Structures are given as C-alpha cells and as structure tokens.
Amino acid sequence: MERIVPMTSVQQWEEAYAASLHRPLFIFKHSTSCSISSGALDELLNWIEDAGGIFLDVVLVNVIENRVVSDLISEQLAIKHESPQVILLENRTVIWHASHWSITYSTLDDHLRTHCEK
C-alpha cells in the first residue's frame, strides 16, 4: 500500500475507478466539519500505519470541498452518500462499504485484510 491520495477531480475518479480492475480501491469520504468523520479518519490512519503487505490504493475525498466528485462516486456506485463513508472496490464492483461509527480499526482490518492481502 502506498499512501492516501487526495481525490479532487472527476478525472482522478475515472482513472481510479478504471484501475480498480487491477488493484483494489479504497475510498474514504471525509467531512472536515464532522467530529465522527475525524474519528473515523484517525481509525484509518492508525490502521494504515500498522498494515503491511496490503495490495490496495487508498483515496480520500473531502466531501465539502469536492462535492461533485463525491456525488459522482455515489451515483456511479449506486450507494447513498454518507460521511464519513468507506467504500472498497474490486473489479469496479463494491465489495464492502460502511459509514459513521461502523468505521473502526477492527472493521477496517477485517475487511481490508480479507480482500486485499498480496
């Protein structure tokens, strides 16, 4: 796993979505004005720090600043927008998603390790 890449454009989304055919894509939709979202981001950052041997691209969409991208993702994947929200794609297919208090270190570890180990 590399690092968290900010997703700020429709072009970035289209490229990442296409790349999910070859490598799992993990999307974190974050609201900078929500304390629940800040807590979920901390859980993700802690998990990333501990994760090893995970084959996964991670992108972060700031939903307030990048509403168009956030809405497009929800529309294209047919998933109701929530924030915070995590979505795991493989082969352009949603294989797991969660929101709010369901985004914890243990749920991230369970789902991401199951689907994304090398």
Image (cartoon, rainbow, N blue to C red):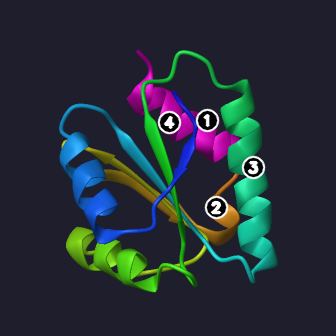
Q: Is mark 2 on a helix, strand or loop?
A: helix
Badge 1 is on which residue? 109
Above-or-below relation of 54 to 94: above
Please state which of residues 48 and 99 is positioned toward the viewer in this rendering.
48
Residue at label 4? Answer: 112
Question: Which label's residue is closer to the chain start, 2 or 1?
Answer: 2
Q: How crowded is mark 2: few (under 14 residues within 10 Å), some or many (20 or more)?
A: some
The span from disc 3 to disc 2 (Cα, nearest Å) is: 11 Å
Q: Please name the residue shown 37% across and 83% down the image.
A: 68
Q: How far apart are marks 3 and 1 (CA)?
A: 10 Å
Q: Which residue sits at x=51%, y=27%?
A: 1
Q: Which amino acid, by three-letter code, is at mark 1?
A: Asp
Image coordinates for residue 94, horizontal then vertical, percent: 29, 55
Pointer 3: what residue?
A: 43
Q: Which of marks 3 and 4 is nearer the N terminus?
A: 3
Residue at mark 2:
102
Q: Is residue 115 magenta?
A: yes
96 is within the stretch colored magenta: no
Q: Which amino acid lies under the numbered mark 2 shown in the image of this protein?
A: Ser
116, 14: nearer the viewer: 14
Mark 1 touches mark 4? (CB < 8 Å): yes
- Kind of residue at disc 4: Leu
